[in-house]
Amino acid sequence: MKKHVLYLLLLLCGPAAIAQKTYQPQWSSLDTRPVPAWFSEARFGLFIHWGLYSVPAWATKSGADGFGSGYAEWYWQRLHTPSLKIHKEFKAFHEKTYGPDFHYQDFAPMFRCEFFDANQWADLFQQSGAKYIVLTSKHHEGYTLWPSAQAWNWNAMDVGPHRDLAGELGAAVKAKGLHMGYYYSLYEWYNPIYKESPAKYVDQTMIPQMKDLVTRYEPEVLWTDGDWDQSSKTWKSEEFLAWLYNESPVKDRIVVNDRWGNDTKGKHGTFLTSEYGKGSVEKGRPWEECRGIGESFGYNRNENLEDYQSTEKLIYELISVVSRGGNFLLNIGPTADGRIPVIMQQRLTDLGAWLKTNGEAIYGTQAWEKAPGKEVFYTRKGKDLYVLCTQWPEKLEIDGIGKPASVSLLGQAVKVAGKFSGGKLQVTPPVLSPGKAGAYAWVFKLENAL
């Protein structure tokens, strides 16, 4: 190609098209990768814990071993860990329900998913207002929801439903215009290769399996876990992420969390993770709070109504997280036959109804650095400020802003009176009839106030 033709192409394409950065397998290089814009704009996602643990679907609520004791997805490990105080409860339930000679592997044929309809799930997810979905492709038990060659016959295609669950759901979710992601456990409790040699397991199972998951389904989130058992060097996390950012089919749009080794949480990854309010949150860095509607991630038949968060509390948590600059990843735990429990459906549709009216104050917003907090929360988008009230206010006073071009109440075609003086706005909320008052939380929009 002649030099002047090449020069013309370079001018037309621009530097971004020709100067694709190559990331080195070191955190100092990997951490310079820009955050794909879609993640911080999404603000609300859904987590799905679904696997063989959905068959027994049971966990204690005693909290005897501290954080995470009520996680039903840990059933197999709790059953065989006598050092835990809750071991006796799990063992007693298991033997009473299934018998002393029933092994965890015997749950596999019972995980039939006969009612699973990926399109129905995707319809509900879209209705909930969530912008991204994260499905457990493999939890610590090692059973995969896709036909993974590295999982021998310990996968959903070979035993159980005989279906590619991860592929079916991914296709349905993407068809709705939502971002699809997968949770993946780095380690496995009882994998014989891992127990023999973690290094051998990483080379022969984990790395090939993660690459297969990424190339096969092209997710936009890879949410790893089980990291604490080894360092990121042992997991070869830097090498894998260099491949992910340089060569994978999703290198420009995928995001990853901070669980890549017992030395990475709160330090590396696209975003930091907080779980049930416990974790690393750093001002100015993308982060995500995850939690279940109940106390467990996997479906727990031992939970009752009082163990589930109300719609009101879930909306308040969404508001609190987003007002602090985070994303909210809310978990659901489907049943072994492939149904989303009705109470979870109800919570999701309630959230969707609220977001349909007030989503402008959630999606694509950032935290307002001058926010005073407490019962009144704030988000911003460009020069607009949103005031989110979890209690209907008798009056509002907002300080440290410019005179807004207008003040309105989202979802209500009513006039909102405001008096501005000395950088302070006093808002007199309108009088609304019960049928027009809305529900749970109310949002005042101050246009061009920043």
Image (cartoon, rainbow, N blue to C red):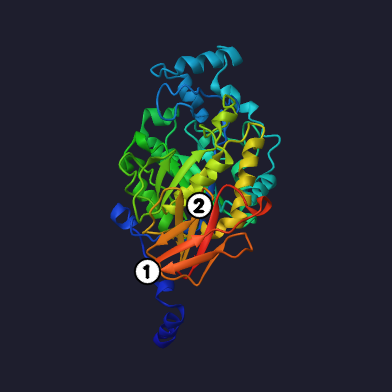
Q: What is the crowding at mark 1: few (fewer than 14 residues within 10 Å), some, or many (at least 20)? A: few
Among the 4 quarters of the image, the one containing residue 93: top right
Residue 345 or 434: which is nearer the viewer?
A: 434
> Residue at 35% across / 56% down in the picture?
284
The residue drawn where x is 40% and y is 51% is: 373
Residue 191 in sight from this viewpoint: yes
- Residue hosting label 2: 389
Q: Is residue 57 above or below residue 121?
A: above
How many discs mark residues in the rendered view? 2
**Element under disc 1:** loop
User: In the image, what residue type sits under mark 2?
Assistant: Cys
Which residue corresponds to the image point at 33% horizontal and 59% vertical from the top-left? 32
Extreme bottom residue here?
4
| Residue 447 drawn above or below residue 203 | below
Q: Mark 1 points at which residue?
A: 422
Camera-side residue of 19 and 220: 220
Q: Is residue 164 visible?
A: no
Q: How far apart are marks 1 and 2 (CA)?
A: 23 Å
Q: Is residue 193 above or below residue 106?
A: below
Q: Where is residue 82 in the image (x, y as percent from the top left)?
A: 41, 16
Q: Given the image, on which type of amino acid does mark 1 rest?
A: Gly
Left or right of 61 in this view: 26 = left
Q: Quadrant of the C terminus?
A: bottom left
Give the mark toward the camera: 1 or 2. 1
